[in-house]
Amino acid sequence: MSVRCCIVGGGPAGMMLGYLLGRAGIDVVVLEKHADFFRDFRGDTVHPSTLQVMDELGLIDGFLELPHQRLQVLEGLFGGTPVRIADLRRLDAKYPFIAFMPQWDFLNFLRESGRRFPSLEVMMSTEAVDLIRTGETVAGVRARTPGGPIDIEADLTVACDGRHSILRERAGLAIEEIGAPMDVLWFRAGRRSDQTENVFARVEQGKMMITFDRGDYWQCAYVIAKGQYDAVKARGLQPLLDDVVRMAPILTSGISDVTSFDDVKLLTVAINRLTRWTRPGLLCIGDAAHAMSPVGGVGVNLAVQDAVASANLLAEKLRRGRPSEDELGAVRRRREFPVKMTQRMQVVVQNNIISGALRPGDRPLKVPLIVRLLTAVPWLQGIPARFIGLGVRPEHVHSPDANAS
C-alpha cells in the first residue's frame, strides 16, 4: 500500500490531521489499532480553541448537536472555602464554554465527516509495529491487521500514537522528562436527574478531587501523590470511597457504582516533550511529542492545535512529494513555544498548589494567595480562562480545501 501520508494513531491529533489532509485532497491513511474509539477515561473536554476550529471547518452545527454538557465557570472548595478559578464568559471567543463530550463521539464525528473525502482512509484494527526505512529516511510503517501484516509506504509518516508511542521509540527520539507530583484515579459515580452542583474542584489537606457533571453520571478524578496507588489499594476500596463521599457528599447515592478497583482507572501523570520531533520522513505531534498534565484539561486541545498547524504548514508541500526534514521541523518551531508555555504553567500549578495540597498534615489548608486574588478580583478570572480555553497562540485553519466550489 502506498500513500502520501500515513498517520499512526486515531486520537484527536491523528483524526484531525487526517481530516484536514483529506479535505486538502492529500492521499492519506489513518491507522487505529483498536476496532473502535470506545475507550473510557480519556480526555473529554473540548475547549473554545477546538470549537473555533470546528467552526472554521463548517462542522460546528453538527458537532454541537451531539450530546454534551457545557461549563463556563470553574468553581471549587479550597479547605472548605468557596473559590472561583476561571470564568470563560470573559473570553473574546465565539464559543466561550468547554464542551464535555465523550472522546469517542468526537472521534467518530470526525471519521464520519471525513467519509466524503475520497483521499482519506481510516483503517481500524491496524497496529503499527515498526518503521520502514530507506537508508536514514522513514519511508512508511509495518503494521498488523486482522488479515495479516501489511507494509504501508508513505512520503510522510506522522506519529500520533500517544505518550507511549511505538514509532517515537523506533525512531530513537529523546524525551525530556519534566515530572509531575501526582497521579489520578478516574471513576464514575451515578447521578440522579435532580442533582445539581457547580463545584468543580475540591481541595483539602492531603487530598484533592475533581468532579464533572456528565448528565447521567459524575466523572470523578481523585488526585493522589505520585507513586501512591499501591498504598491506596492496600488500604482497601471502602476507605477510598469514604474519603470521596466525605469530600463530595453529592456522590453518596451514586458511589455504589464503584464496586471494585476494576472500576477505578489509574492515570499515571507525566509531563515531557521531545527535544526533536522529526526524522527524515517522520513527524511526531500530540502526546507522542509532548505529554501534558491533566491540569487545565488542555491535552486534547493541544493535540488538535498541533494537527491544524501541521496541515497549515505541510499540506501544499505534500502535494509535491516528501517534505524535507527542515520543512517538517517548521511544525516544532511553530508549536514548541505554546507547548513549553503550557507545560510551564502546569508546573507552576503543580508546585504551588497541588504539591502543597497533597502533603499530609493536620493543619487547616490555607487558600493560596493567587486563588484568593482570582476569587476577589473577578476580571482576573479571565487570565486562567484564556490559558484553559484558548491556550497560547491558538491555531486557525489555513490549509486548502480541495472540495471548495
Image: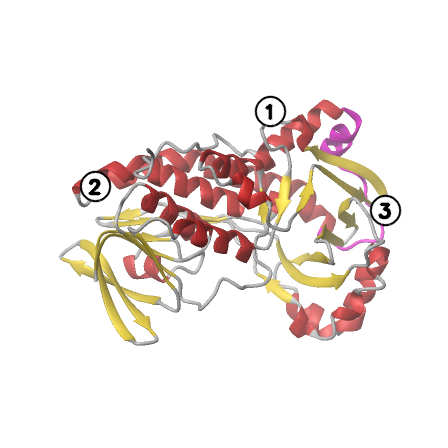
Q: CA distance from mark 3 to mark 1?
A: 38 Å
Instruction: Give, as a three-letter code, the residue at label 2.
Output: Arg
Instruction: Give, as a three-letter code, the residue at label 1.
Output: Asp
| Region rendered in magenta | 358-377
Q: Please say whether residue 276 is visible from this viewpoint.
A: no
Q: With respect to residue 375, does 310 lie above or below? A: below
Instruction: Give, as a three-letter code, the residue at label 3.
Output: Pro
Name which of mark 3 and mark 2 comes first in the sequence.
Answer: 2
Q: Position of residue 313 (x, y in %)?
A: 31, 35
**Disc number at residue 319?**
2
Q: Nearer the viewer, residue 138 or 12?
A: 12
Residue named by callout 3: 364
Q: CA distance from mark 1 to mark 2?
A: 36 Å
Q: Nearer the viewer, residue 210 or 71?
A: 71
Question: Residue at 75% across / 25% down in the picture?
Answer: 378
Question: How many C-alpha atoms fall within 10 Å of the one at disc 2: few (<14), some, or many (≥20)?
Answer: some
Look at the numbered disc 3 and give the secondary structure of its residue: loop
Taking the image as shown, residue 370 lies to the left or right of residue 11, namely: right
Residue named by callout 1: 92
**Disc number at residue 355?**
none
Look at the numbered disc 2 and give the secondary structure of its residue: helix
Name which of mark 3 and mark 1 comes first in the sequence.
Answer: 1
Look at the numbered disc 1 and give the secondary structure of its residue: loop
Q: Position of residue 29 (x, y in %)?
A: 31, 56
